[in-house]
Image (tube, grey):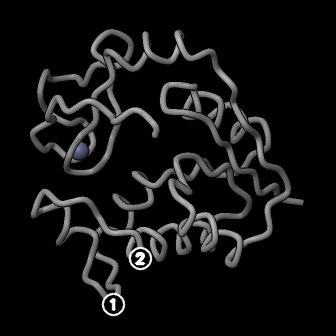
């Protein structure tokens, strides 16, 4: 039986690391919004392709993200989903497209989160995550994933 697991937690809680471990353990796919968008850049949606937004340096809007994540989950034989949903609309969408076997919340002390987040960077093009100390890109300022200029925008703290 393939597992369908959702991992939740504040930015900096270690969702990516723990998701990868879980995916390994259960032999299922680690699905993130960023990976799904990169893998389906050219997918046509009612609103355009993800690429059209990335190329324009804009955030990919919710309805497009929803469709992309849905496609990625449908393609996967079991998954650990990480980084989605980010808001109530996405959560409602997710509840309609899949049945989860488990939802795991990573509860990390706020001080620890702030320390980790201070060095965190995200690619404006594809959403790939970096950390100045723990996970720098191979070439400073250039995104490993999309080759785009890797800006030093900090991830916003959760509201
Ligand atoms: Zn990138």
Kindly give the residue lying farthest to the bottom in the view shown.
Answer: 46
Residue 75, compared with residue 86, is above or below; it is: below
Residue plotted at (69% across, 26% down):
107
According to the image, label 2 marks what residue? Answer: 63
Horizontal arrangement in the rendering, residue 123 relative to residue 18 (left or right): left
Point out the quarter of the image occupied by ligand 1: top left
Residue where numbered disc 1 is placed:
46
Residue 62, percent from left and from top: 40, 69
Contact between labelled residues 1 and 2, with CB atoms less than 8 Å apart: yes
Which numbered disc flags the more N-terminal residue, 2 or 1? 1
Q: Residues within 10 Å of mark 1 (few under 14, many from 20)?
A: few
39 relative position to 67: left or right: left
Q: Residue 73's x, y, as percent? A: 61, 67
Q: Few, some or many C-alpha atoms within 10 Å of disc 2 (few <14, some 14-19, many ≥20)?
A: some
Image-quadrant location for residue 136: top left
Query: Taking 51 as reference, is 64 left or right?
Result: right
| Quarter of the image with the N terminus in it | bottom right
Which quadrant of the structure image shows residue 45?
bottom left
- SS category of the residue bearing label 1: loop
Q: Residue at x 71, y 71 (%)?
A: 95
Looking at the image, residue 28 lies above or below residue 108: below
Which SS class for mark 2?
helix
In the displayed structure, 44 sits above or below 99; it is below
* Quarter of the view holding residue 18: top right
Q: Is 115 or 151 nearer to us in this picture?
A: 115
Q: Position of residue 50 (x, y in %)?
A: 28, 70
Residue 59 percent coordinates (x, y): 25, 59
Q: Is residue 49 left or right of residue 106?
A: left
Q: Residue at x 62, y 64 (%)?
A: 91
């Amino acid at each position: 039986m393939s597992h369908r697991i959702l991992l939740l937690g504040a930015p900096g809680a270690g969702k990516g690391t723990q998701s990868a471990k879980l995916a390994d353990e259960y032999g299922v796919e680690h699905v993130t919004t960023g990976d799904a968008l990169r893998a389906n850049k050219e997918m046509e949606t009612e609103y355009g392709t993800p690429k059209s937004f990335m190329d324009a340096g804009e955030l990919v809007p919710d309805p497009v993200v929803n469709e992309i994540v849905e496609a990625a989950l449908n393609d996967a034989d079991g998954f650990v989903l990480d980084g989605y949903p980010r808001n109530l609309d996405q959560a409602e969408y997710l509840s309609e497209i899949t049945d989860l076997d488990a939802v795991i919340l990573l509860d990390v002390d706020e001080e620890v989160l702030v320390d980790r987040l201070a060095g965190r960077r995200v690619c404006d093009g594809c959403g790939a995550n970096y950390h100045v100390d723990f996970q720098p890109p191979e070439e400073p300022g250039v995104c490993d994933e999309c080759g785009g200029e890797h800006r030093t925008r900090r991830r916003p703290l959760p509201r």
